[in-house]
Image (cartoon, rainbow, N blue to C red):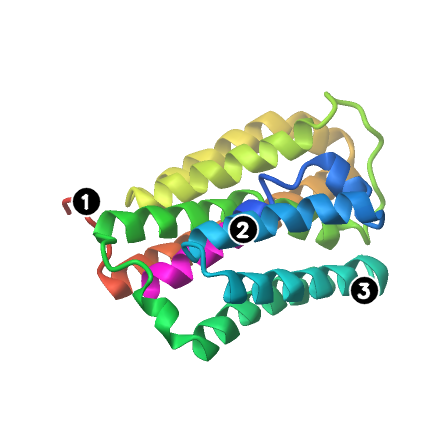
Amino acid sequence: MLTTALALLFAHLLADYPLQNSWIITNKKKPAAMAAHIGVVFLLTMIALRGEILPALTITVLHLGIDLIKTHLAPERLWAYVADQLAHYTTIIGVLWFWPDLALLWPDANIWVQYLLAIGAGLILCVHAGGPAVGLLMQDFDMLPQQGLPEAGRMIGLLERALIFLMVLAGQPGGIGFLIAAKSVLRFDTASKDQKAGEYVIIGTLASFGWALLISFATLSLITFYGIDPTPS
């Protein structure tokens, strides 16, 4: 059951984040963009379920329903974003409960397969899912004028969360302190000249680091609890 669950989780996260490009996100209310996204969801779910059509269709249809509600009815708020993702995870759990035989789909999967699926899912959740979450949290604050490179803030967030994830999984969480210190030094000039900008950066940084630490340690706990770490200690 663990391998199937991890495969479905990884498929969902892959479809919802790295494989959901800016065109799909921008045009989600248009049928073509939604169809493209749902097509990717169905394909990846079929792979995760090794061709089991009925449960794959069930997950896909429910995914479509959840996305339609989020796109057309839900507000652009952090709680709605989190609720949307929890609804998708609940769908996966419900399908696994309704079709218990799906637990037998990966009899040949070894510990490396489970480990890589857990790491892949955790990395996407930490790095990619954290961006929209932090952005929605910060939307209530006055937005700063664009002064730096286009998309630079987003890229910095992706890189810092990726580094935190790698440090925690490598057993070197102490390195996160150096990452905080380095960012503080680089942002010192901005913070010292503009209190508003400094507070905005601090809140955004703490939110990004907090998200990354939460997901990183949750992934590490999952790996430890199920004993699926094949690397030597």
- Residue 21 visible in rendering: yes
Which residue is rendered at x = 44% and y = 53% of the image? 48
Which residue bears the numbered disc 3? 74
Q: Secondary structure at mark 2?
A: helix
Picture coordinates of residue 217 (x, y %)? 39, 56
Q: Amino acid at mark 3?
A: Ala
- Label 2 and label 3: CA atoms lie apart by 20 Å
Q: Residue at coordinates 62% horizontally, 69% vertically from top-left?
A: 87
Q: How far is mark 1 from mark 2, CA to CA?
A: 24 Å
- Residue range in magenta is 1-12
Say which mark, if any, is on residue 7. none
The label on residue 13 is 2
Q: Nearer the viewer, residue 8 or 100?
A: 100
Q: Residue at x 50, y 45 (%)?
A: 124
State how far apart marks 1 and 3 are (Cα).
43 Å
Kindly indicate whether the residue at mark 3 contacts the one at mark 2 (C-beta within 8 angstroms).
Answer: no
- Name the residue: 22% across, 60% down: 227
Outermost residue toward the bottom in this view: 98
